[in-house]
Image (spheres, rainbow, N blue to C red):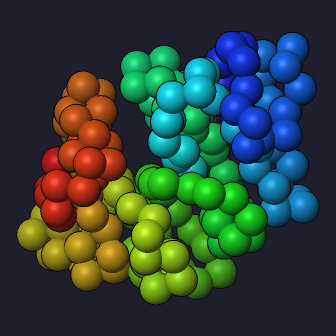
Amino acid sequence: MLLSSSEPQSSSFRVPEQQKRVSSSLSKGVVRFTPKSTESRYRVLIVDRDPMSSDLLANALVHERRCDATTIQSSELMPALSTNSIDLVVIGAEARSDLGDGFDLANLVDRSYPHVSIVILLNLTSQDSVIKAFRSGARGVFSRLQSMPEFFDCIEHVRKEIGRASC
């Protein structure tokens, strides 16, 4: 589910002006974003263990950080990255894909699209899981036990390329 604003679109996107909510055509590998204004907004794809948690994160990012965020299934992530300009991917460690878990998916994204930043979501944070997340290419690691404002801070740190940080 793509969440977007109803303000004018940027000329680099093909989305009707009157459209308040834009759905993605993921079966064709196309994700469309509607920027809130002509200012630079970052684009986020979210792959999580279930659609409800993905939608909650996307909603929060759109409303609190004014970014363009959409949820996507793990099987559709690589085609979407190949056809869209994406800045950041949030991947749940428990997300399932043909490759395995979210760590394996993050590793593939990091190898294929090194310019795309990755944040890994962990249910339980252990030293091993944090190390595994960073080794898989994540630039940020966030525990679901932390608050939503801390999630926003983690996204901002990674977005601003402040190195790798456990959020």
Going by the image, does 19 lie left or right of 4?
Answer: right
Image quarter of the N terminus: top right
Q: Nearer the viewer, residue 84 or 145?
A: 84
Q: Residue at x 87, y 14 (%)?
A: 18
Q: Nearer the viewer, residue 133 or 18?
A: 18
Q: Is any part of residue 69 visible from this angle? A: yes
Going by the image, does 136 lie left or right of 124?
Answer: right
Q: Nearer the viewer, residue 126 or 107?
A: 107
User: Vertically, is 15 above or below 42?
Assistant: above
Residue 14 rendering spot, x and y as whole percentages:
85, 40
Q: Residue at x 51, y 76 (%)?
A: 113
Going by the image, does 128 lie left or right of 136?
Answer: left
Q: Is any part of residue 56 visible from this angle? A: no
User: Vertically, is 151 above or below 116?
Assistant: above
Count of numbered marks: 0
Residue 82 rendering spot, x and y as whole percentages:
69, 71
Q: Quadrant of residue 133?
A: bottom left
Going by the image, does 97 lie left or right of 16?
Answer: left
User: Vertically, is 58 above or below 138?
Assistant: above
Residue 49 rendering spot, x and y as whole percentages:
53, 53
Q: Residue at x 9, y 69 (%)?
A: 127
Q: Residue at x 77, y 22 (%)?
A: 21
